[in-house]
Amino acid sequence: MPKVRSAKFEDAETIANIHLSSWKSTYKDLIDEKDLSNITLENRIALWETVLKKPVNGQIAYVIENDEEEVVGFVSGGKERTKNYSYDGEIYAIYLLDDYQGRGYGAKMIQTFAQGMKEAGYESLLVWVLTQNPSNTFYTKLGAVPVEAEKVTIGQGTYEETAYGWKDIDTLLNNF
């Protein structure tokens, strides 16, 4: 039975490894190789050590463990960063190792994350996803609606992202 728990500083390297591995497998057909290889393990470790040591922007993070208590995925977010939309919360990152996708782990992470955001006082939630990413359906199945699409720079390339949102976190939580 998968278990979601708050991420700890000691999880930083594991989260960084999952982030890098999942990033490359998820985006290998969506992002040019030169842009994809821009991300290094060292950069990801530094990022997650910083996030977990001193969260900013109201950021929270959770990890999910498999039956052997190994961390196999994570979700993180906080205040909506652009302030261009009428959403107060945002999922900044959600990644899961390939072997655990399609088995309910992602939904369990989203459910725990949404509950944590609600408890922190957030009322709505936004997530940005590459428009060509087939996992967009994961969010729409949970009741998210497309909000806006815009161009984003990754490495040297320009790609389109779509924001999906839940105007009411309770609407999301009622899908579980």
Image: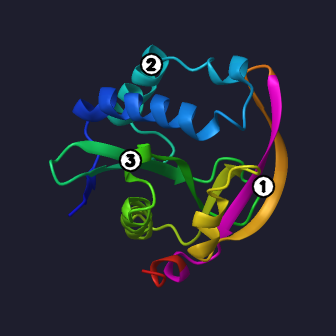
Res 99 label: 3
Q: Between disc 1 and disc 2, whose residue precedes?
A: 2
Q: Secondary structure at mark 2?
A: helix
Please identify the residue farthest to the left as the structure is shown: 68
Q: Is residue 123 above or below residue 157?
A: below
Q: Amino acid at mark 1?
A: Asn
Q: CA distance from mark 3 to mark 1?
A: 36 Å
Location of the C terminus (image quadrant): bottom left
- Residue 145 position by quadrant: bottom right
The residue identified by callout 1 is 84
User: Residue 25 vs residue 153: left or right?
Assistant: left
How far apart are labels 2 and 3 at the CA level?
Answer: 20 Å
Mark 1 and mark 2 residues within 8 Å of each other at the beta carbon: no
Disc 3 secondary structure class: helix
Give the image location of residue 10, x and y in percent: 22, 31
Camera-side residue of 34 and 44: 34
Question: At x 58% / y 41%, what residue is drawn?
Answer: 26
- Of residue 101 and residue 151, the one placed in the foreground of this image is 101
Q: Are marks 2 and 3 in contact (CB under 8 Å)?
A: no
At a point 27% along the width and 34% down the height, the residue shown is 11
- From the top left corner, tell me how far across and down residue 54 is, in percent: 37, 33
| Residue type, label 2 | Leu
In the image, residue 151 sits, relative to residue 132, either above or below, namely above
Task: State the residue at coordinates (55%, 36%).
Answer: 25
19 vs 101: above or below: above
**Range of magenta residues:** 157-171
Q: Label 3: how many residues lie within 10 Å, few (<14), some (14-19) or many (20+)? A: few
Q: Secondary structure at mark 1?
A: loop
| Image position, residue 89 (x, y; %) | 57, 60
Our reading of the magenta stretch's main secondary structure is strand
Residue 165 in the magenta stretch? The answer is: yes
- Residue that numbered label 2 is attached to: 41
